[in-house]
Image (spheres, helix red, strand yellow):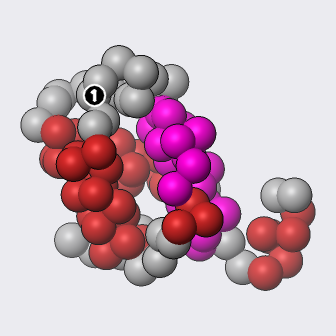
Amino acid sequence: MALVPPSTSDTVLDAVNECLIELLGITELPPETDLVDSGVLNSLSMVGLIAKLERRFDISIGKEDLDLANFQSPLALARMVGRKTAGPAEAGRDR
């Protein structure tokens, strides 16, 4: 699996969706899908997803990132990954 550059949010969202679809064995996942409340993502699959995202994007997801809001939807995940892959100048603009 190749690393995905964070050039556009669509690219990051597409890569996050690929990880989710591969991990969960589903075929379609709209960006606003509620992953947590719907039960699509549980604690066990979340651990697998974290490992997959860390490998795919060459990032580290730490305790400070484990807020359920970051895992609520594919779009929320893409935003978190985007923040983690942004350069220092870009990360400052996100605040």
**What residue is at 50 percent from the left and 34 percent from the top?**
72
Q: Is residue 47 above or below residue 27?
A: below
Counting from the top left corner in percent of width and height, residue 94 is at: 82, 58
- The residue under the point 17% across, 28% down is 27
Q: Is residue 70 magenta?
A: yes
The stretch of residues the image draws in magenta is 66-85
Q: Amino acid at mark 1?
A: Val
Query: Relative to 57, is 45 above or below?
Result: above
The one nearer the camera, 32 or 9, is 32
**Image-based side of 66 in relation to 79, left or right:** left
The residue carrying mark 1 is: 40
* Residue 21, horizontal then vertical, whole percent: 22, 40
Name the element at disc 1. loop
Residue in view at x 29 percent, y 24 percent = 39
Residue sticking out furthest to the left = 25
* Relative to 3, residue 38 above or below: above
In the foreground, 66 or 94: 66
- Residue 19, visible in the rendered structure: no
